[in-house]
Image (cartoon, rainbow, N blue to C red):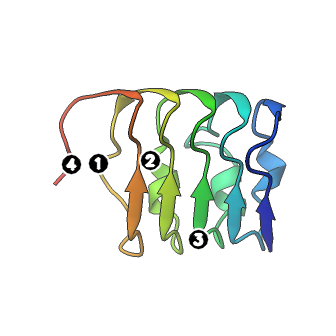
Amino acid sequence: LRFSADINMLTGNIPESLFSGSLEYLSLAENQLDGQLPEDTSSAWILGQSLKFLNMGDNMLTGQIPENLLQLPNIEEVYLYSNDLTGPLPLTYSSTLLRFSADINMLTGNIPE
């Protein structure tokens, strides 16, 4: 399943229900989404086991990048550029991850090895 709604005027939080079991591609870039990505303890990361591509760039997301996002077993590309994300970069990530972008945020700490 592929869901894309880039360059719109979507607002509010990202509903955990978007991360369904068959969703492989989710792109909501260049909207006005705010709030946080689902937390590590969220069922979204259990439901999102098929997710390969996530683009939430150029929104108004806050909080930290969840460790579980970059550890999804099939994840290949994650784009979180141009948000208001804070905290450290996750220390571990899936061996399937090919591209990760978190440019233009307020991240702190060391770059993981």
| Residue 107 percent coordinates (x, y) | 34, 29
Q: Earlier in the sequence, mark 4 or mark 2?
A: 2
Quadrant that contains the N terminus: bottom right
Mark 3 and mark 2: span between their CA atoms?
A: 16 Å
The answer to whether 58 is drawn above or below residue 27 in the figure is above
Mark 1 and mark 4: span between their CA atoms?
A: 5 Å
Disc ID at residue 112 = 4
Q: Residues within 10 Å of mark 3 (few under 14, many from 20)?
A: some
| Residue 15 percent coordinates (x, y) | 80, 41
Do callouts 1 and 4 mark residues in contact (Cβ within 8 Å)? yes
Mark 4 and mark 2: span between their CA atoms?
A: 12 Å
Disc 2 element: helix
Tag 2 residue: 67
Instruction: Name the residue rendered at 40%, 64% in the picture.
Output: 99
Q: Earlier in the sequence, mark 4 or mark 3?
A: 3
Q: For the residue marked with disc 3, what is the amino acid?
A: Lys
Mark 4 and mark 3: span between their CA atoms?
A: 21 Å
Confirm whether residue 51 shows in the render. yes
Q: Residues within 10 Å of mark 2 (few under 14, many from 20)?
A: some
Q: For the residue marked with disc 1, what is the amino acid?
A: Leu
Instruction: Name the residue rendered at 81%, 41% in the picture.
Output: 8
Disc ID at residue 91 = 1
Disc 4 element: loop
Which tag is nearer the camera, tag 4 or tag 2? 4
Q: Residues within 10 Å of mark 4 (few under 14, many from 20)?
A: few
Do callouts 2 and 1 mark residues in contact (Cβ within 8 Å)? yes
Horizontally, is 43 left or right of 12 in the view? left
Q: For the residue marked with disc 4, what is the amino acid?
A: Pro
